[in-house]
Image (spheres, grey):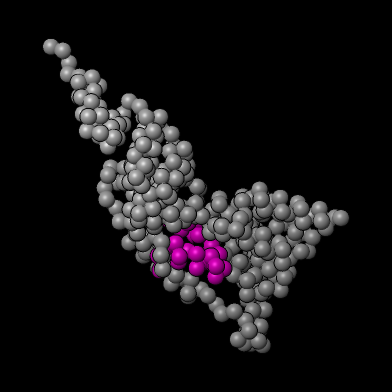
Amino acid sequence: MRSDLRRLTWACVLLTCGLSLAEPLVGPSVGRGDALLAEGTRLYNKRKHKDAAEVLLQATRANPSLLPAYLGLARARMGAKDVPGACAAYRAYVRSAPDIQDRTKAQRELALCERKLKAARRKKRNKVPPDMTARHVELKAGFFAALEEGRLVGPGAAGETLRTLVSEGYLGTDLGDMAARLSAASQSTTDDLHQRALAGEALPTARLRESGALFDLARDTGEPSAKAAAQAPFLEGLAALQSGDSTGAQRLFAKAASAAPERTEYRVWRAAALQRAGDLDGALTVLETDLPQDARTDVLRAASAQRKSPEAGARELERILFQRYAPATR
């Protein structure tokens, strides 16, 4: 009964902290660092070293500047007999910790860990994981080069490089800065794409589709953007429209319009998608409902009338020219 209760409690902590199958990389999307640290410490005190190490590792991802999480992780890994992992965590802590009593003690523990690691390498040879320091230095250099060049998503890009560092177990407070810069660059890029699309610029379909990965990357490396709920489906809708999927496009434009009701452009694009699919009456209904006083609604109304008959088109055009937009009386 108690073990079931503990499992339930831990599941609630994971849900509260935001851990999910989306595999966020670094930052708030991973969870709440302080909550993870508290749970990891609780597990460590119960001598559940392996479980504690898993949770404390997440704490270092959620908040890379949370130094006690590194020290706790190192000790939990030592308790779980993961000597190489413990040494990596000790190094990360000693590298960044201020010169206080805990750091001095951690240096002694690191020295002991290094001796054990050296002995294990002599004894087990190829069974002990290699030192990844040089590789991680190279990966970080590649990350900053890609970031500088604006290569954010795709093979060898900054996002993929950061994901590799995380998956290979890199530990360090600099992960926080790397993630924050990548998240900011991703959001800046999607904002630029969105503005250019709204201005009517013809953007390559591949570039529009890439925006989805950029929104995901921004979320997985920092604070989720409040604008993404509208911008993401809008850009995806444009990509669908350019690919000939008018039905999918109008659904996505409707989603964007629902997320940002103040953006009239999303409603116009939804109508355009319906018109592109051959549903001119449906497009007109959308604009008459959402934008009854908009000039673009008048244009579509005239086109709809013209399709019914030349006479109806002429009457609607006359109404627009001489009633809707009558010249000022002099």
Q: Which residues are magenta?
A: 156-183
- Is residue 176 rendered to the left or right of residue 74? left
Q: Is residue 44 magenta?
A: no
Q: Main secondary structure of the magenta part?
A: helix
Check the image and name the residue furthest to the top: 330
Identify which residue is drawn at 62% across, 87% down.
125
Residue 122 to residue 27: above or below: below
Identify which residue is drawn at 70% across, 70% down.
78
- Is residue 41 rendered to the left or right of residue 152? right
Identify which residue is drawn at 28% across, 32% down.
305
Q: Could you say which quadrant of the image residue 172 lies in? A: bottom right
Q: Could you say which quadrant of the image residue 107 lies in? A: bottom right
- For the C terminus, the image quarter is top left
Position of residue 216 measured from the top left corner of the image (x, y, whole percent)? 48, 54
Instruction: For residue 99, say whether it is visible.
Output: no
- Is residue 97 rendered to the left or right of residue 158? right
Along the line of sight, the residue nearer the viewer: 65 or 289? 289
Along the line of sight, the residue nearer the viewer: 279 or 124? 279
